[in-house]
Image: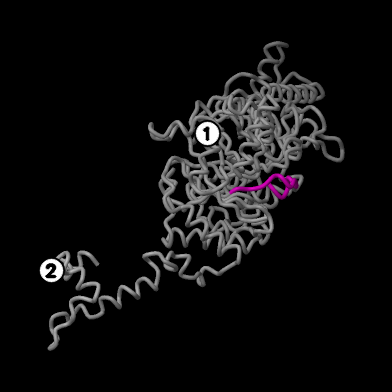
Amino acid sequence: MAYIVGISSGIFGAAQPQERMQYLGISNKVNYCITQGVTFTQVDVETMSEFKDPQIGIEDDAKREAWKKKIKDMNIELGFHGESQAMGGRETPIKLDSAIEDDYVRSHDRLMEVLENAGKLGAKYYLLHSSESTPFILLGKDFQPSVLVDFWGRPLDVFIKEQKDADGKPWLLDWVMEQEFMWREIVGKTPREYAKERVEDYVQTFKIDYDREMPEENRAQRREKIFNDLKIDFLERIRSRALHYGPERLAYWVVAKYMQETNDPLWAKITAEWDRKKLEIKKPDSVASIDDKDFRESTEGIMIWVPAVSAKYLWGHFTQERCQGGSLAKGNPKDPLEKHGMYFVIESPMAQAGMENLMRLSDPVHMCVLAEEVGFKYFRVAIDFEHVLSNYINPQDMIARMRETDGSLVKVIHLGWPTPVIPAHMPIYVGSDQHRWIYQRLYELRQKGFTPDDDRWLIYERGSENIEESIVAMRLVVEFLKDNVEPDKLPQKFFGVEGPSSGSEDYQRTIIQQHARDPIEGLLVMPEEGFTTLGKAAAEKVGGKKWEKEELR
């Protein structure tokens, strides 16, 4: 058990033309780490087709095991960084927090396949970004089919109808029918406007003056029928292939209400942060309720309740054993993970300019809550300081907000240091401010459980940048982090000024002594000696002037 230093392989799409050969497929990417003095490679998967690399022969047991033996003989271990928007491609293939049926099913199937493939190759972990679905706040701009599912991948209309109170009344459906903002979302009208149209239809059909001639008893029956028709119509609409602007928002509102009313742990723990933001919003007395417009629609509220629902959808993919039938998803990701002893780790997505605080699930604090609630030893968290900053989150504040044991849920750290313009993946130089900054953050994480009593991977994620001193800098971090050395007590060795290097104190002292009398040279009554014994002999051969100028010293 230890802190393990490794590098990412880099990606073909970002490589210089003269270097692209080393990025062609998993086999070439794995070998890259040997040239950099480490024995762990995080393979950046740009396409699922890489698992079909003929050099690996993943479907041929004998060939695959021979490839794995070759890697083992070279003392190489590997993990995988799964596909993401940063890797290029037409779209993100795995959207684990999507409520659109097609996205949910496709993402689940693809996840099952890539986990099995990575496990067959002996990977230590498989990493994905926590959320790469369209940001919730931008959904109103996108056309989507309104075929919606719950967090287990079941039809959303089924989920809504099965939520009943102690008297058997469908409380969640009744709540939905009362929410004008939902009706405008899916129908384009409020329930009252829609019902009025239906009443007028009935009046025309039966030639009845509704207001004056219909008996009260019949009127009540008619109202009940209209209301039931509205329920049926609404439930049919959320199983429609017709395109609407952002119907996925409706699923998120419904699941949020369910989580709120059932006191779901993910909701309770993540939305607890709303209490600390009360003074920043218009209504200081508002609570973490989806019924509260400020909480539901303000940017501050969306940044808290949407991560809770996003986390619930990820939770659903990994808790299929708790689903009471009807799920469209096939298989449980826990199975290949447990079979191969491989970790699944989630990492903050990389937010491009303009998307800084919009991603659905980007805060590692929320991810630690999710990992705890999934309750599975192979479901863990990765932290990339650069990605965290890109999501408008201060990495130091993020660590401060983590609970006392959250560091134990973190398995992978992506280094280097965070830059405000991404992706940068700049090298780490020994003794630099960035080198020390990284050590301080990892030391803070160590105090919250990120200890070497378990394998934890420190990966220099390079994109296609040069490594330079990064590996040396990371080894120095590990050397002192494992001994829990306080940042203010780091020795000179950490800063590269110890030992035979040009920056060491002994070397500098020698240079000073050699030149201590330079300011008074030529001013003494007795002329100083220009040559030693060796120097005189050298002067006779090469000329005294040359020796005095120290050209040969």
Quarter of the picture holding the N terminus:
bottom right
Magenta stretch contains residue 341: no
Q: Position of residue 366 (x, y in %)?
A: 63, 49
| 2 or 1: tag closer to the N-terminus | 1
- Looking at the image, residue 94 sits to the left or right of residue 32; the answer is right
Q: Position of residue 212 (x, y in %)?
A: 72, 21
Q: Give the secondary structure at mark 2.
A: helix
Q: Which residue is mark 2?
A: 545
Q: Residue at x 55, y 27 (%)?
A: 245
Residue nearer the viewer, 201 or 393? 393
Q: Residue at x 68, y 36 (%)?
A: 119
| Residue interval drawn in magenta | 371-382
> What amino acid type should be assigned to the residue bearing mark 1?
Asn
Q: Which mark is residue 181?
A: none
**Mark 1 burial class by Cα count in 10 Å: few <14, some 14-19, many 20+:** some
Residue nearer the viewer, 488 or 144? 488
What count of labels does the image hold? 2
Q: Residue at x 18, y 80 (%)?
A: 529
Q: Position of residue 100 (x, y in %)?
A: 64, 28
Magenta stretch contains residue 381: yes
Q: Position of residue 518 (x, y in %)?
A: 20, 77
Q: Is residue 222 above or below residue 551?
A: above
Q: Give the secondary structure at mark 1.
A: helix
Which mark lies nearer to you, 2 or 1? 2
Q: Quadrant of residue 429?
A: bottom left
Q: Which residue is mark 1?
A: 28
- Looking at the image, residue 302 sits to the left or right of residue 233; the answer is left
Q: Is residue 50 visible?
A: yes
Quarter of the picture holding the C terminus:
bottom left
Q: Quadrant of residue 16?
A: top left
Residue nearer the viewer, 208 or 181? 181
